[in-house]
Amino acid sequence: MRRTLSLVSVALLSACSGSEPPPDQPLYADPPNVTAKPLPAPVKKTYDALDRATFNRMATRINAPIYWLADTNGNGVPDPSEIKSLLFYPTTEEWVKDGAFTAAFDVYYQRLVAASKAPGPTDARQKLMLRELDGAASVLVNTDLSKASDETREVVKHVIAASKAVDQIYAAQLGIASLGGSVPSDDASQSVFRRDWGPSCQTPPLDQDPNCTAIPGVTKVVTDAYPASLQTGSDPCKKLESDPGTKDLISQPFSVIRKTPKGYAAVPFSVAYATPMKAVAMELRAAADAINDKNDVTLTNPGGESAFKAYLNAAAKGFETNDWNPADEAWVAMNSHNSKFYLRIAPDETGYEPCSQKAGFQVSFAFINQNGIGLQDKLTPVEQSMEDSFAQLVGAPYRARNVSFHLPDFIDVIFNAGEARNAVGATIGESLPNWGPLVEAGKGRTVAMANLYDDPDSRAVRKKKAESLLGASVMAFYPVDQNSSSLETVLHEATHNIGPGGEYKLNGMSSEKAFGGDLSAMLEELKAQTGALYYLDVLQKKGLFSPDEVKHAYVDSVVWGLNHISRGMYNGAHQRKPYSQLAAIQIGFLMDEHAITWDDKATAANGTDHGAFVIDFDRMPKAVEKLMRIVGSIKAKNDVTGAIALSKKYVDGTVVPQAVIAERCLRFPSPNFVYAIDWK
């Protein structure tokens, strides 16, 4: 389960194809031979025709794996040290060699200039393609391995190779693996298809427009999780959950449903996606073989990288056998004290497909950030008291369990792949696994992504959004660093391990069965994010946080929620956006409790917008406690009626000024995280 700034869900129902794509085809169509296109007249090699923002925007438009990181010397032109080559594009180029730009950079720079001067398209679909690409600005996550050991660099290279195979698996899961050849050759369509994991647009509000598609005429795509013939009608998930032939198969997360001569059957991922899964296993074993434990032995980590090596081998086995429990055991055994690496490569989250039942393959690869250890040490002694507090607040039928969960490791992301590499935003916290013996035992591992949204561009845009929606009195407590967001993320992910979760059953019925996949997923995230607010006050009373720290975290959470509300409540297939919906419920409920007020007459902190949110910090603890009790009780009792009532009032109702929030936040492009590595 995740705390995120966006989820991508492009596995939609199909109006165009009933076939099931083969799983091992590459994600991308053969890209156009860009260097063979007629080029504009040469420009002077001063590279002063584009500012940085335009440079990066045009690079996305022409689907080029290039990024201008920063104008570090303020000279207004890109310098070789400022240009990065991006991962996970269908083409690769060397932009800098021996400290100077290459001929490839000259060619592409001319293409960027030409794109910036090109007249706007007259074709309606092409116009939508450019709007879609401009709706999300590339934000670079750059990792410097220039001084890393040969061993580390070799490990990273093999994980990259494994991740590219995971991309192929995920593309097959989405149902887009065979569609690459149907994408028109124009750069914008190719770029949308690459970035958005398929033809459908992902930036709000274009994600609601069926005409915004990278493949003319293709408005919906059939997920590979279920037979195409079962993904028809107004509510195919309900049909799958009630059909005698599929109702016991849909909830098996590590399989796909296939129609056979003897009826429907659950086919393991290792069979359905055999070729790329074997490729992942091979690369993970190569990464493990590259590790010499003796090279990494330290006084604080006498085992070297033995824990990481064990996970690599166990994960490789999982990709061959489809038995993920040993890999989960090895993964949970890793932590910030016994490895410098963080890697999760597995089938995990379900939001990519319309019924939210089948696990999607993802990769999150990072280095451990040691700064989080202090917060872990602060919260570990109160884990059981957090569970006891929840149980006492919610009451019967829920009873407190003995819990033992690992509080978040802070990580610096190197790159994400598969289901974790989103078109808009990125996961900022995750608690896994979602199924299996470890979950039943109340064990797992949680991480918080420390380096995402912490770049200067992201910080500046987020503050401008906040200033357009919050009053000056609230902005006085706007957090000046990542500490508040990190604290929220830690508490959010900790709450996933508290109370009724994925393995909780009432009278033999799980939450997924009671609520249905997407409503169940939204409620679990609502529980976790409400817990992030609830435990602020609980732990402040224990002396763990100061009043100002709590106020900063409240403001940060409200800003987080407003950003999600701006993205709309549903995707193009009317599937719930869990984070947007939980944010609307939270903000709306706190408005009803007068802990948050929308003042039409107030001037926002930016001094220009009229109408602003004001927070009554004194009312927040009781209002949050009330919401925690309601949400916890709904989860504990499998109260479908209560869940739907919350959704209707705050998600589909008018309590929250959703249109105003969207207008102000969407003045700014959403972030699309891209990845680069400095090898030299």
Image: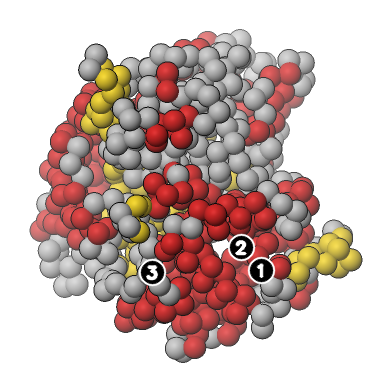
Along the viewing direction, whichever of 119 and 216 lies nearer the viewer: 216
Mark 3 highlights which residue? 397
Q: What percent of the width, then of the height, locates residue 417?
A: 39, 39
Label 3: how many Cα within 10 Å (few below 14, some 14–19, many 20+): few
Where residue 230 sits in the image (x, y, percent)?
42, 23
Q: Amino acid at mark 1?
A: Leu
Question: What amino acid is at disc 2?
Answer: Gln
Label 3 secondary element: loop
The residue sitting at 42% across, 63% down in the picture is 636
Is 281 situated left or right of 251 in this image?
left
Q: Which residue is mark 1?
A: 590
Front residue (pair 365, 571): 571
Mark 2 or 3, nearer chain start? 3
Tell me if residue 215 comes above or below residue 94 in the rendering. Answer: above
Count how many numbered circles sit on residues in the image.
3
Q: Are marks 1 and 2 in contact (CB under 8 Å)?
A: yes
Residue that appears at 40% across and 53% down: 511
The answer to whether 148 is drawn above or below residue 303 in the figure is above
| Residue at which label 2 appears | 586
Residue at position x 29%, y 36% from top? 248
Distance from disc 2 to disc 3, alpha carbons, whole Å, reads 24 Å
Residue 163 in sight from this viewpoint: no
Compared across the picture, whether 419 is left or right of 52 comes to left
Q: Is residue 546 visible?
A: yes
